[in-house]
Structures are given as structure tokens and as C-alpha cells.
Amino acid sequence: MRINYEKLPYQHEAVKSVVDTLSGHNDLATKMVLEPEQLDESVQETLLNNNQKYPGEDYLKPFPQFNIEMETGTGKTMVYLQTIMALHKRFNENKFVIVVPSRAIKAGVEDSLNKLKDYLSDIYNTDKYHYFVYDSKQIAELQNFAGSNFEIMLTTVQAFNKSTNVINQEYNEGFFGGRPLDQIRDAHPTVIIDEPQSVDGAKAGKEAIASLSPKVTLRYSATHKDKQYPMLYEFGPAQAYQAHMVKHIETLGTEVNTNGNVAFVQLKEKPKPVGASLQAKVIAYKQVGDEYKKKTITLNQNDSLFEKTDNPQYKEWGRVVEINRADDFVEFENGNQATLGNNEGEAQIWIQSQMEALIKDHLNRELAMQDQGIKVLSLIFLDEVKNYRIYTADGAKKGQYAELFEKIYERVIHSNPKYKKLYNYNVPVDEVHDGYFAQDKATKKKPAMYCDTKGDTNKDETAYDTIMQDKEGLLTQYIPGKSETDTKAAKLRFIFSHSALREGWDNPNVFQIMTITTPKNDLTRRQKIGRGLRIPVNQNGERVYNDRQNVVTIYASETFEQFANGLQKEYLQDGVISNKIDENTFAGLIIKKHQSDEDNDEEDTEILNPDSNEFSVPDEQPQVMHKITNEESNTFAEVLKETKITNSKGVVTVQGMRSLTKEKKQQIVNKAAEKGLEEETATSMVDYFTNQYKVPVIENRQNKEHVKVINRDNPYLNDLWEKIAKKVNYRVEFKEETLINDIVNGSNPLADIQLEKMTAVQKRAKINLNKTNVSNELISTNTEHLENSDLPILDITRQLADQVGLTKQAIAKMILETNKKNPGFINSIKLNPALFVQRAKQNIKTHESRLLNQSLVYVLNGESWSKDNLKPFNAAKNTLWVVPDKGLKKTLFDKIAVDSDEERKFANQLVNEDKIKYFLKLPHWFKIPTPFGNYNPDWAILAEKDGSQRLYFIAETKSTTDRTKLRNDENARIDAGKRAYEAEGLEEVIFRAPVVVVGNLEI
């Protein structure tokens, strides 16, 4: 197939902006305008037309330089090659140097120079260029550069940015006894810099560009760092996205939940200094109730993750031996490390789930696009080449990811008969994928071998050469029976690479991108999406515009919220979007305003899109278009600072945005008017600002109130406290055999435990982009159940024995006897061993509780709770019940902290019941020890029966008196509490639980 090149309006505008600038906006000019004053005037006109900022005159020295921003995937190379053709035709410019930062980009540009040569000559109706790729081993080619021919030289900056480069050496013969570089300098070429932030971001790069003695330099990038050069044209991410000139972006992240079956640990954020040491936050499985859940754990030097999580999976890890802020890791005694972005323990499960999702998406897209002639490609970045291809004495073999891919692909493509419609259905699995890696050359002692690189070495050129040779072949759709499509490249649909394809290679038909990389890999989110942004082409080489299907999916190692936030951070760092208001933020904004100078408070103004030429102006209210000037923009920016909407640096603050009430907006308008802005203009700018910058609503903190002591010397309190304040100890005794029999054959046996499967939840989200932020929109979720076959085997008998205080033999016996009675029980445990351990622990403890309660005995220990501990305290306002005036004589505090509506109702009844003489909501520290944990009863109550007999109660309120509806642990504590107040010396205290109303006390 052959790609058909399309004339795109924004590309034409980008070329025109450069030509107009260099012609002085004179259609008759045939020479470039380079006189500084005239050029600067022309530049300002271009900036005005394109709503760009004027940076000042420094860009003119030592030679004019200009920025042109083209988002990845919008044809940056095409634009600057067309610009070269336009400058050659219009001004007869013949000498051009294209400088790139890496071999990857060089390979891509070389491919374009070769394939676009005839096309560009035809559309510009001018002669063809001659191009060459600079090679220090073929230095003689430079001698042709000094002639009058139309020449383009392509080079990396590394080829001439050091004094030791061949091109900078003095020659006694050839080059007229000078340096090869002088051939270029004498020609005063127009220099094109591709990705200037990587070419001349440092001093050496700038000096290297200056050494070429350029006539003018044009800088093309999606990410300009140097803002001191005028932006002649901008077609950035927001414009490309909104103009539908790139694919839309969605992410799919997998959240793995093995319920603690795997010792998962991940460093959540960079370690931080706390005092004289470092502190780290990791995500790990922590015991919560009867389950293990991923929680954030704070670790210091010498901390035990096992002790912090109460999870035996981490027992063998030992303590923290190193927290490293330089390389971002936490190391434990057994050598394991928690690192940023690395799913230690669950990485293989994540890879498998993501790869399966990618293959399914790929096949489903092929079904949808096959008849349109669109071949679908997937790109997978690897952490190490050896994980895809292994070299042995017997030759190359498949690595673990190649084998995993083939296993999943075979299973998925044969899982549904709908896939039989695919042209590729019968293509052998080993022909649908391949790797493109840098290669060590073969020697006598060893064959050619692929290797890990960063994409910037000589070895990488082997990968670039291969992929560029296959570029059209990779876009060719394989059709069975059609011999011209029966090629390796046509059958290939899944491409694995290490780093070679992260830049410089943008195949338009990449729809899926997955990264299996180490945490330190420097592949940014922009680089990930950049490989798949181009609009796809069909078998005729024509672009196919279809927003519903033109979507690139990123299989991210983070949630979609994290991906969107991270992408926004990268855009902010690159200056692509901004949350900062400066003197030029509003300059160039178009608004409608009334011709009359009269005050028009009743009229609405609106913001118009500067890219739109359509304005609806009612006849009865004549309006004119007005472009906000830099002066007006600066005034409004200062007003936003003065009114605390932005901080002193011009950054929009959350507090400032929350303060934007109707009154606050009017205050801003009034202040702007005082500074000379027309009120209508200021109102429009306020409206524009509030639409562009929005903040989430955050709930306020709970307000706390002080709870006061009313009367500590109440005689009823003294009497009640004397009776209930005595402390107790307990003792128990029962036989292990009795427990095992109860667990296997009694009620609520071990066999009744229900287990859920482990899951991998995949969330798909659309990424939205505008000039000020990146947002996400959840599209769908999908839950897959994980099999335990690939997970490490847990020693469940040891873990249960440790947690319930029984021997391993006792645990094994109860499991084996349960399995004998219920065949298949042991197999069911394999569904989720870690969850079984937790639920079996609760089951065993329930049976222990029953037996413990049968033999539980309490005795006084001679100590008492001190009444002095009853002190004023603070509590959340929404948890407090205000004691009515008639109840203040009956209790100690003016407010009572209650946990439920039942407690509020019960407290109100205590106040109103005449038989109740005093009551106290027991403080949290008033605890009865039990084998099941400390028990804190709700109420202490003193009542009088028949007006004289005093009754002393400890009571526990619940929503029901039906104990069958209470949890096992609640019942166990109630039983223990009852036994505690049966102890000798506490006979006068009556324990009542559960109670709902005062009547349940049976006074």
C-alpha cells in the first residue's frame, strides 16, 4: 500500500505563518525580511493574528529564532518539510539543515525525506530537493553543500556539539584547508530544529546551533521549553484534540485484589525527611476485620511491616533496613524492596490482566474496522529484552512475555466464534507478534543479539531501520488468498519494543499501547499516548475520520484518575496548559461589547471562541468585536491578585475560587473599572475566568464542641460509682478435642464458610483535554476472577494456628475431618486461601467464645476505676445529644456522646423516667477484660423501686433485644459482661443487655 497525503488546513496555516512573517506580510516579497526592525514589526503582526504573546526583541540575537508548536501526531515533520519547500519557492532559499536530538527521530525524518520528495515537489510545483544524512565516515558529502543546489542536510546535534567531532576538525587537505563545518557556515542555512527542548536545551546545544551560522532558525516541537522565541503558530494538544485531528485518549487500569494471598507492597510516594530521619508510605495488605485490604502504611527505620499490618505474609520480610530518597525505595531485611510504581508481588497478575484486556480490545477493534480496510496495531513496551527473547547456546528462544502473550492470544481468539470472521483468525500465533530492539552485531564468536538500550545508541539504528522498512507493510491488511498480502509485515499486528519506538515512529494505526516497564523507566505519559495519536489510514492510504472509533487505549499501571492527573502535571510542566494568570493570559480574547459607552448592567456579554468566525449580533442591540489588549489583560490579572483570587505569583488558588460569589464577582468588576477597564469588558473577563478555572467542593470538617461537667458531688453519682467501679480479672479452661468436635459437627461448622474469588477490576476512562486542564470520565468497569494456580501456596495451618492459639495438628485435623464430612471442602479453600484464613479464624474464635463462656470465671482484683477520670472533653457536634434542663440533675455532663439514634432515644427515656435517679454514659476507658477483647458497656444507671430500693445497672443498648440478630462478637462480649457482674463483690450490680427501651431494665 502507499500512504496518500492529505492537505490539512492547520498545516497550511503553520506554513503560511512562517512565510508571511519572513515576507513582512508582503505578498510580492521575493527575499526574506531579516532587517531586525522590519522583521520585528512583521513578527508582531503574526502574533496578533494568531493570538500569541510577544516575548520582546531578544529573539533577534544573534540570529532570528521562532517557535512553531505542533502536537504529536499532527504531522510536525510534514509541516517543516512543506515550510522548506515554501521558502525555497518563494525566496529561492536552497540550504537547509535539519537538526534532531536522537537517532530515533533521525530515522523517522529520513524516511519522510525519502517518501515525500516527489509529493512535495508536485504540490509546490518546484524542483526536488537533494538530501543527505550527515555521516562522519562520509564527510566528503559536505563539499556539495556549498554549491547552488537545493540541499537538505539531516543530522543529530551530537554529531557537531563537541570540539572532538570530526566535523569540527581542521583539515590540511580538502575543505579548502579548513573545517568541514565551515562548508555549512559559509552557506548561512535555514536551520530547522526538531524537538529543540532536547537539542539546545543546554548551553552546549545552543552553541552548536550558533556554530552553523544560521540565517534564521525555526523550532518545531509539541513541548517548547524556551519561551523567549515568538510562537508564530500553535497547534497544541487542546487544539488538536478539539479539532479531531488526533485520536481521542482512553485509559484502562487494572486494580488487582488478591485479598492478601500475595505479599504485595508498593511505595506510594517519594520518602520524606521527618526530623533527622526518613519516613516512607507504602501500600500493603492490612488486616481489616476478617479480610486483608490495601491500606497506606507509614514506615520508619526498623519498623516491621508484619507488625504494622498484622498480616503474616510479611513476617519473613523482617524490619526496614533502608529508606532511600535518592533512588526511591524501601528495603527490608530479606532483601525485598518497595519501589515507586512497582506492584511488587502482584506484578505478574497485573501484566496478565492488562495483556488479556489489550488482546480482547485489539480483536474487537479488528472486527469493527476490518471491512473499512483499517489494520489495527498494538504496541507493547518492555522492561527488558530478555523477557521477550532469550539467547541460549541453541539459539534464540521466547521469553516469558512472548510465551504469556501467545498463551492468552490463543485462549482469547478461540473463546468466541465471532472472531472466526477475522482475516487473521488462522494466522499462527507466532506470526502475529514480533520484537523491534537494538541489536549487537554478529561476530565469529556469537550471533547478532538484541539488547536493552535507551534509544540513543548506534545499536538502536538496527531497530529503526527494520521498523521503517516495514512501515507500509505494517499498515497492509493480510487477506487470506491474496498473495500480495501474504507477508511477514502484513500478518504482524502486535509489536514489542524496549525503547526504540518511544519517539520518532508514529504509526497511524496503533490503537493499543501497553507498558511493562520498571519504575525508573523515563517513558512519560505524553510519550506513551504520542505513539498512537495519529488518525488511522485505510488500505488506500487515506485518513479515516471517525470519532467513535478513533480512540487510542493506554493500558496504564495506575488508575485513570492518576493517569489524568499525571498527564495534566506533565502538560503544566511543559507549559502546554496553565493554571497561572499573568499579564498576557487574557490578551487576544475576543468579546462582544455594545458600541454605546452607556452603562448596560441589564445586558449580558459573552466570550467568543477566537478560532470561530461566526458572530451573532442582534440588529436591535448593535455590538462590536473587541480584542482584549495586553494592557487590559495585565490590569485584570492585577485585580485578581488584589482580590485574593490568585496568589502573589498569579497562581489560581482553591480558596480564591471558592470565594467567587455573586458579590465577589461584582467587587472584581468594580475594582477593574476603577483601574480604567470598561465595566462590560471586565464582566466578560470574569465570566471567562470562572468558566475556565473551577475547583471541587470539599466538605467542611466536623465542628467539635466542649462537653462540661455539671455536678461531680451528686450523692447518687457517688453511690453508683462505688458499686460499679471495681475492676475484675478472668480465667478460663477447656479441652482442644471438645473445640475440634464443636467446629466440625456443631452449629456454624467450618464447612459453612463462604469465599469470594480474587478479582482484577479493570476501569476504562476517557481522557478529556482543554487549554487549562486534563480531566477523566469513567466509561466502564469489568471484573475478572483470578485463579489461584499461579499464586504461592499459603501455609494455612501455620497461619491459623498462630492466630487462634491452637496447634498446627489441631488445625489440620479439623480441616481434614471437615473435608471427610464435606468432600470438596479443601478445593474450595483454594479459591481464596488468605480470605479463608481470616474467616476460619473468626469461625474458630466463635466456637472458642462459646466454650470460653461456659467456663469463664471473674474475680475482683482489688483495684477500682477512679472517679477523678471523669473529666470535661471535646467531641464532634453531630455526635452530641444535649441534655434537657430537667435531666441535668440526673447525669454528670451537659451533653452526651451517642453512637446511634437508639442511644439518643434511650437517653431521653432515662431523663423522663421518674424511677431513674441517675445515669451515666460510660467513658471509653471504662472496660471489662474478656477473652474476646476489652468490653466497654454503654450505661451505668441508678434506679429506685417503690421509692426506696436502689437498683444498680450496667446496660448495653442495641437496636433489638433478639440476640440471634447480633454479631457473634457482640454476643460473646455480652455473655462475658454478664459473668463479670456475677463475680463475688459485684452482686448488687445488675447487667442488662441488650436493651432498647427503659422498660427492658425490668425495674
Image: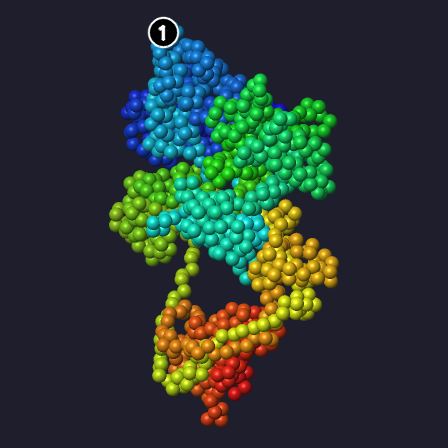
- Specify few, some or many for label 1: CA neighbours under 10 Å numbering under 14, 14-19, or 20 or more: few
Residue at image x 37%, y 52%? 654
Residue under the image location 44 percent in, 29 percent down = 13
Residue 371 lies, with reference to residue 790, above or below; the image says above
Q: How many marks?
A: 1
For numbered disc 1, what is the local secondary structure? loop
Tell me where residue 425 appears, x and y as whole percent.
71, 35
**301 and 299: which one is in front?**
301
- Residue 425 makes an appearance in the image: yes
- Residue for point 46% across, 12% down: 138
Which residue is found at the position 62% from the left and 59% from the top?
A: 808
Residue 985 % position (x, y):
48, 83
Q: Is residue 212 above or below residue 335?
A: above
Query: 955 or 648, which is in the foreground?
Result: 955
Which quarter of the figure has residue 396? Answer: top right
Q: Position of residue 598 (x, y in %)?
A: 30, 49
Q: Which quadrant holds the N terminus?
A: top right
Q: Which residue is mark 1?
A: 172
The answer to whether residue 469 is visible is no
Specify whether 782 is left or right of 207.
right
- Left or right of 634? Residue 3 is right
Residue 806 figure quarter: bottom right
Locate residue 634, reporting x and y percent: 29, 42
Of residues 798 and 719, which is closer to you in this image? Answer: 798
Rendering colour mode: rainbow
Q: Mark 1: which amino acid?
A: Asn
